[in-house]
Amino acid sequence: MAHFLLRRLAGIIATLIATSFAVFGSVHLAPGDPAAFLLGGRSASPAAIEAIKAQYHLNDPFLVQYVKWVGGVATGDFGRSVQFRQDVAGLILARLPTTLWLVGYATLLILVAGLALGALAALRPGAVDRLVLIGTGVATATPAFVAAIGLISLFSLQLGWLPAFGNGTGFGDRISHLTLPAVALALTFTGLLARVTRASMLEELAREHVEVARSRGIAGTGVIRRHVLRNALGPITTVTGTVVAGLLVSTSIVETAFGLSGVGQLLVGSVTVKDFPVVQAVSLLVVLAFVSANLLIDVIHPLIDPRLSHAKGGSS
């Protein structure tokens, strides 16, 4: 396991280096002069343009600029926002709690609803199974922005049950404000997890050892808990880890639709005004979330299924 983790960490570092190079290079691949983008389309004197180039090291060779940027990132310095005239790290940290609350709330909804619906479909073949498949199919095919519009129209404008905009203050008010965004964010991923749970449990239900356990008179709940659900957790855990990382990408749409001042909305606004330091920092953090989630899944899997631990130990 130690050798496996070292290999995975080396792969993560290589991925982050390659990604950081691609993210930083996007500024130079964009058409036009980077200094003009940094000025946001405003006219400026030659002296002001030279000052911008000096501040962002635009006169240096590309590799020199990249090394300086990576060195700053390694120490937590992501540069300075062109739009807000503030440190990028401070901007992200100020908005990160809202995004984490939203992602955490949506993750809870996905786990509860996805696992429950998937298990229900697997254990209740027939009408219940078909109904769950239809519902999860619709949920999976519904984009987050469509779900956001529908939820705002029904629960906020027509029924007036929940607020449609803002972060809220205090625990209760924050939960109230984040409920509709969390549902809109979780809808597609809930359908995905439910279908994966159903398929995984059906596969385990068809195995011979489950039939043997039932023939020995073991209670149905005991069979499901010990022989079906436990063995089905491998694919479910994999999808769950990927989903949680993917939520960070989807927050940009939902936060913009519901007026939440989170990292996703910051990214959308920064792309619009070409605030490259912010775009670079957020993009790199999203990639870090993905690779960290994958590493966490690889660590958890052997704890769920010891057979994977033996396989990895043999391959290392």
Image (cartoon, rainbow, N blue to C red):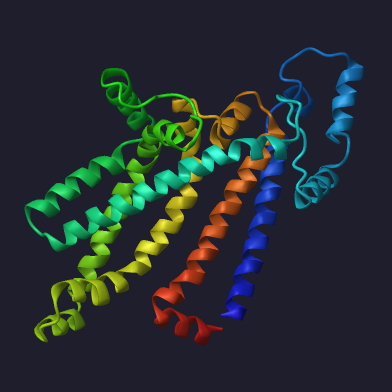
- The front one of 304 and 40 is 304
Q: Residue at x 29, y 58 (%)?
A: 196
The residue positioned farthest toward the left in the image shown: 127
**Which image quadrant is residue 292 in?**
bottom right
Q: Quadrant of the N terminus?
A: bottom right
Q: Is residue 29 visible?
A: no
Q: Residue at x 84, y 34 (%)?
A: 58
Report x, y in % for residue 41: 72, 16
Where 247 sits versus 235, above or below?
A: above
Where 28 sits versus 115, above or below?
A: above
Horizontal arrangement in the rendering, residue 115 relative to residue 75 (left or right): left
Report x, y in % for residue 308: 43, 79
- The front one of 117 and 252 is 117
Q: Quadrant of the C terminus?
A: bottom right
Report x, y in % for residue 128: 11, 52
Q: Is residue 249 visible?
A: yes
Horizontal arrangement in the rendering, residue 77 relative to residue 213 (left or right): right
Q: Residue at x 37, y 33 (%)?
A: 180
Q: Residue at x 17, y 74 (%)?
A: 206
Report x, y in % for residue 74: 76, 52
Horizontal arrangement in the rendering, residue 229 relative to residue 241 (left or right): left
Q: How many marks?
A: 0
- The front one of 90 and 19 is 90
Where 178 sits versus 212, above or below?
A: above
The residue positioned farthest toward the right in the image shown: 47
